[in-house]
Image (tube, helix red, strand yellow):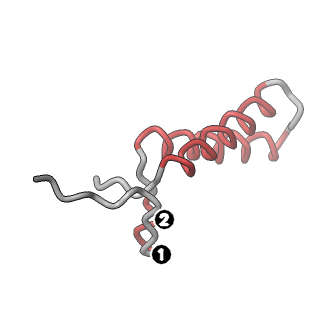
């Protein structure tokens, strides 16, 4: 897998993922909304951990730093 998620975006995904997961875990969100929050939160955290987002391939988005040529 080629990384396609950059540092700032990874940080944002961690914050969003933890927030959604925590809101559902502590019953601030309930029912179907909590299930959706668990799913989206988990996906956000996974894409942050692996620095890879399958959706970005479809849209040809790459927010990671470009590779620099080594000497």
Which numbered circle lies on residue 7?
A: none
User: Is 33 placed left or right of 66 in the picture?
Assistant: right
Q: Position of residue 26 (x, y in %)?
A: 82, 24
Q: How many marks?
A: 2
- Tell me the SS state at disc 1: helix
Residue furthest to the left = 71
Say few, some or many: other residues with alpha carbon within 10 Å of mark 2 (under 14 / 14 to 19 / 20 or more).
few
Q: CA distance from mark 1 to mark 2?
A: 7 Å
User: Is 28 placed left or right of 48 in the picture?
Assistant: right
Q: Is residue 6 above or below residue 49?
A: below
Residue plotted at (40% across, 42% down)? 50
Residue furthest to the top = 26
Q: Position of residue 67 (x, y in %)?
A: 27, 58
In front of the other: 52 or 43? 52
Q: Position of residue 10 (x, y in %)?
A: 53, 45
- Tell me the SS state at disc 2: helix
In front of the other: 36 or 19? 19
Q: Tell me if label 1 and label 2 are in contact, CB under 8 Å.
A: yes
Residue furthest to the bottom = 59
The answer to which quarter of the image holds residue 66 is: bottom left
Q: Is residue 33 above or below residue 21?
A: below
The answer to which quarter of the image holds residue 64 is: bottom left
Residue plotted at (46% across, 70% down)? 61
Residue plotted at (74% across, 36% down)? 19
Residue plotted at (15% across, 53% down)? 70
Which numbered circle lies on residue 59?
A: 1
User: Is 28 placed left or right of 63 in the picture?
Assistant: right
Say few, some or many: other residues with alpha carbon within 10 Å of mark 1 (under 14 / 14 to 19 / 20 or more).
few
Label 2 sits on residue: 55
Q: Position of residue 4 (x, y in %)?
A: 40, 58
């Amino acid at each position: 897998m080629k990384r396609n998620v950059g540092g700032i975006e990874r940080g944002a995904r961690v914050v969003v993922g933890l927030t959604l997961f925590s809101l559902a875990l502590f019953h601030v969100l309930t029912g179907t909304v909590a299930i959706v929050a668990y799913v989206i939160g988990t996906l956000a955290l996974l894409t942050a951990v692996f620095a890879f987002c399958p959706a970005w391939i479809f849209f040809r988005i790459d927010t990671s730093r470009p590779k620099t040529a080594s000497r």
